Amino acid sequence: MPDDAVTHLTDQWRAAGAADVRVAADLSELATLAGQATGPVLLSGPDLVAHATVLRHLATHPAAGTVALVLADPPAPGHAAVREDRGQVVAAGPADTLPGATGGFGGALRVAAADVPALAAAARAAARTPSVTPARPGPAVTADGPGGVTPSGGAGVDRVVAELTAGGTLTFAHRVRLLVARRVVDPTGLAAARAELAGVDEDAAALRLAVKERDDFFTTYFVSTWSPYVTKACARLGLTPTGVTMISVLFAAVAAVLFGVAERWSLVTGGVLLYLGFVLDCVDGQLARYTREFSPWGGWLDTMADRAKEYLVYAGLGFGVAHAGLGDGWALAIAAMVLQTVRHHTDAWYGVLHDEAARRPKAATPGGGLGDRLNAASNRVQADTGSVSYWLKRTVVFPIGERWALIALTAALFDPLVSLVAVLVWGGLAFAYTGALRTLRARFLRVPALGTVDAGLHRDDGPLLRRLGGRLPAQLPLAALAALAAFALLGAALAGWDGARWAAAPALLGLLAAGLAARGRAEGALDWLVPAALRAAEYVFAVAVGVAGDVPPPLVFGYLFGLTLLHYDLVARLEKRQAAPPWRDLTLGWEGRSALLTVALIAGFAWLGMATLTAYLFVVFVWRVIATWVVRPAGAAR
């Protein structure tokens, strides 16, 4: 490549945020420079010609791990092909030796700080590998902010990425859309690539890229068609993604209040505000992608705010049903919140299972089977973007856009009772559909997802179980037993049985039986269902205590709402692979909270016990948020 092309590339890396850009003469020098790096490393070959926005997006990718640039074009001779699964690069190497390749390596990597030692080792290993393409110097970026080192030529970078993936480094794929990225080998290709770059409005493409490539039906056609204009306006006004998130929360809270009024004007207005709040809920993510303002705090807040908004709306609908004299709205609101939370926990854990399977493809059962066929069929549908089957698959699972649209429309056209019943019916059917298919596919995957993370943390085991829990292997049957015990107590309480108050003690023993496996290895094909089963057991048990102890339904809802905040915090940490929250034992664990409620019920002050525990858990949650996002970062900065 001409020297001016290398110089232009180094200037682009500096513009993308690289603190220290260096050109490595060969892979051995790259290994040396990587060994000296104290932060993330941006790495590219000199044959990459791309918009500066492409490099900026790679450098600021929100994934916590290593990220590789992936092109849709087939790789040229000497360049690596890649195979992806669920957004991860699971294999890389020469196209003629890599079956099932899904794209070509784009010649650039952002290596996470934790993976820099692996990068140095991969560069040393690649240096020992014969190359069919002469090495050429190019910018490699090291980072304390980040910074960079670029190794030899394109072929050198390709050998490095192949060694990294072969060594098990978790690498995410960053696909190029709308913008241009090309790997060129001669002046003719360079001129053509530069002409292609000049023909694209970079800012307009960046704004369109802020919209998710694949989203749900309602979001795609009723939100994303005009939300980029709002995103652009927010950027010009200097609003932050967090600020937009808080405005969205305000819209949803006002909508919940209007639903509680349950008058026709308030229901219509509430439906409109709920829709606009959902638009802003999409805009906060689009604004973050457009301005590249990503932060762990923003990602956590977005996850928590989404659930808090939804459950506030359920509360408003439940109050509206009771206020309008349409029935027991709080019972419906509680049922909707429990159903949705348990669904989300199965979604999160199935994602962990599938990600682990992507990193360990050999764990899958060879030879096919029903699960294998379902997996292949699902992949075919997902690949057929825009088809009827594609949209049906994305809609039937009842994603958040469809939930909010259903609530807004049914509330505006009918009443809060119809809204809650519709949410429960569609949500229940979606849960049954996804649960059945995922169970079959999980048996095919045969990956022990719970064995790859802190199972006790994400089961929400308390100090009692962590110290005294057993090691039995049957985690799912015992968790199912806990759920059955909770449902049996709820049935007795709803039937008005006088002994329900005392039946709480044996029901609690049924719950605690799940602790017999608390310290065992979770390697069953379906053990990813355990956390969701325990959530269902604890929530239903709390509802049963409320019914048996004549606790006011709004208080039961408030207690469960506090539990969902604690558990969604754990889900957010699971998805981001973050550490355990501070003062973990202060929440007492599901077994400790259930035991306290049982004592309060038998003693005859269930409402006081639940109110006290609710206030206590909210205080602990707020203090944990402050400690995680204010105190700890301040201490680290000092």
Image (cartoon, rainbow, N blue to C red):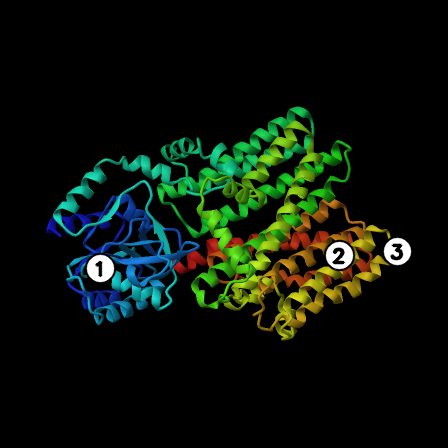
Residue 78: mark: 1
Nearer to me, 552 or 173? 173
Residue 554 in the image: above or below residue 502: above
Image coordinates of residue 20 in percent, x first then y, are 22, 56
Image coordinates of residue 397 in percent, x first then y, are 57, 46
- Residue 51 visible to the viewer: yes
Circles 2 and 1 in contact, beta carbons < 8 Å:
no
Circles 3 and 1 in contact, beta carbons < 8 Å:
no
Which picture quadrant has residue 636? bottom left
**Quadrant of the snapshot with the C terminus:** bottom left
Quick check: 308 left or right of 223? right
Quick check: 435 left or right of 302? right
Image coordinates of residue 319 in percent, x first then y, are 71, 37
Q: Nearer the viewer, mark 2 or mark 1?
A: 1
Q: Nearer the viewer, mark 2 or mark 3?
A: 2
Amino acid type, mark 2: Phe
Q: Nearer the viewer, mark 3 or mark 1?
A: 1
Question: Distance between the Cα atoms at labels 2 and 3?
Answer: 17 Å
Q: Residues within 10 Å of mark 2 (few under 14, many from 20)?
A: many
Q: Which residue is mark 3?
A: 498
Q: Earlier in the sequence, mark 2 or mark 3?
A: 2
Q: Residues within 10 Å of mark 3 (few under 14, many from 20)?
A: few
Q: Residue at x 59, y 65 (%)?
A: 527
Circles 2 and 3 in contact, beta carbons < 8 Å:
no
- Residue 247 visible to the viewer: no
Q: Earlier in the sequence, mark 2 or mark 1?
A: 1
Amino acid type, mark 3: Asp
Q: Residues within 10 Å of mark 1 (few under 14, many from 20)?
A: some
SS for tag 2? helix
Quick check: 597 left or right of 153? right
